Image (cartoon, rainbow, N blue to C red):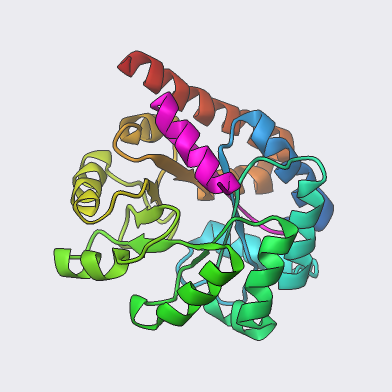
Amino acid sequence: MSRLDDTLARLREQGRSGLVCYFTAGDPDYSTSLALLRSLGAAGADIIELGLPFSDPVADGPSIQAAHLRARAGGQTVARTLELVTALRETDVSTPVVLMGYLNPVMQYGVERFMSDAVRVGADALLVVDLPVEHAAPYRKTARAAGLHLIAMTAPTSDDARLAEVLYEASGFVYHTALTGTTGAMRCVPAEVSKAITRVRRHTTLPVAAGFGIRDTAQARALAGTADLIVVGSQLIELLASKGVEEVRQAVRRYAESLANRSSSAD
C-alpha cells in the first residue's frame, strides 16, 4: 500500500475524518516552506496538499493567488518543488503528499518525467484542477504506470451523469469542491456540502474530501463524518502571511483536535 492508501485505511479504521492542509510550495520562501512542511505531520495534518506555483492560478482566490506570486518571486519552480518534497522526506517518511496544481507547469516539465520524478521524490498523488475528464485518460494511464494517484474532482453543479463520467476509474480519493467559486472566496454551507457528498457517494466507494470554503473549526466539525477528508487552505495561507509559522502550527493543531473531538463525541 502507498502512504496515501495506508493513511486512508487507518482513518477508516479509526472512524474519523482526516485533516488535509494545503500550502503553496516555496511560500513565502523555500526555507520557511520546508520548516513548516516538516512540522505538519506532528501538528496533526493527516495529508499535505502542496501547491505547484503557477502564474495564473484561476481556480484560486486572492489568498492563494498571492501565495503563488510570493513563491514564484522567490524562485520556486516545479523542479524546486520536487526538491522540497525530497527534503521533507528526510524527516517525514509517512505523511502523504498530494501535489496540486495546473496542467501547464506539468506539461512544461514533461508529463511522464514529472510523474516519474514525483513518485521518486516521495509524492503520492496529483490533483490537476484544470484537467477535464474528457482529456484525462492518457494522464491517468501515465500516473498509474508511475504509481501515482490522479485525483478526480467533483463540483456542486455536477449532475449524476457527469459524476459517473468523472468518477469512472477514479483513484485514491475524490476531491469535492464545496463551492462553485474560487478557493477561499466565501464560506461553504456544511448542510449543502453534505447533500452534495451524499450524491457523490452514489458513484464511488472512494473516500471523499471536502475543500474550498472551509474557514474555521466549526465548519470542519460540521462536515466531519460526512466527508472523509477535510481540506483547509486559504485560512492557513493567510495566517502564514500575517503571523508566521508558529501560528499556523497552532491552527493545524486546533483543526486536528476539532476533528478528533468530533469523532470521540460521535462514539
For residue 235, say whether it is visible.
Answer: no
In the picture, residue 47 is in which quadrant?
top right
Q: Is residue 208 something that shows in the picture?
A: yes
For this view, does 213 lie left or right of residue 157?
right
Count the marks: how many? Answer: 0
Q: Position of residue 8 (x, y in %)?
A: 47, 40
Q: Is residue 8 magenta?
A: yes
Residue span colored magenta: 1-26
Considering only vertical position in the picture, is 186 above or below 9?
below
Identify which residue is drawn at 80% across, 57% down: 30
Q: Residue at x 30, y 68 (%)?
A: 166
Dividing the picture into quadrants, the one containing residue 240 is top right
> Which residue is drawn at the image coordinates 44% and 58% (left, top)?
183
- Residue 257: x and y in percent read 51, 23
Q: Residue at x 60, y 30 (%)?
A: 44
Q: Residue furthest left?
A: 160
Viewed as shown, does residue 57 lie left or right of 248? left
- Image-quadrant location for residue 265: top left
Q: Nearer the viewer, residue 223 or 248?
A: 223
Residue 155 at what x, y percent from top left?
29, 61
Residue 166 is covered by the magenta coloring: no
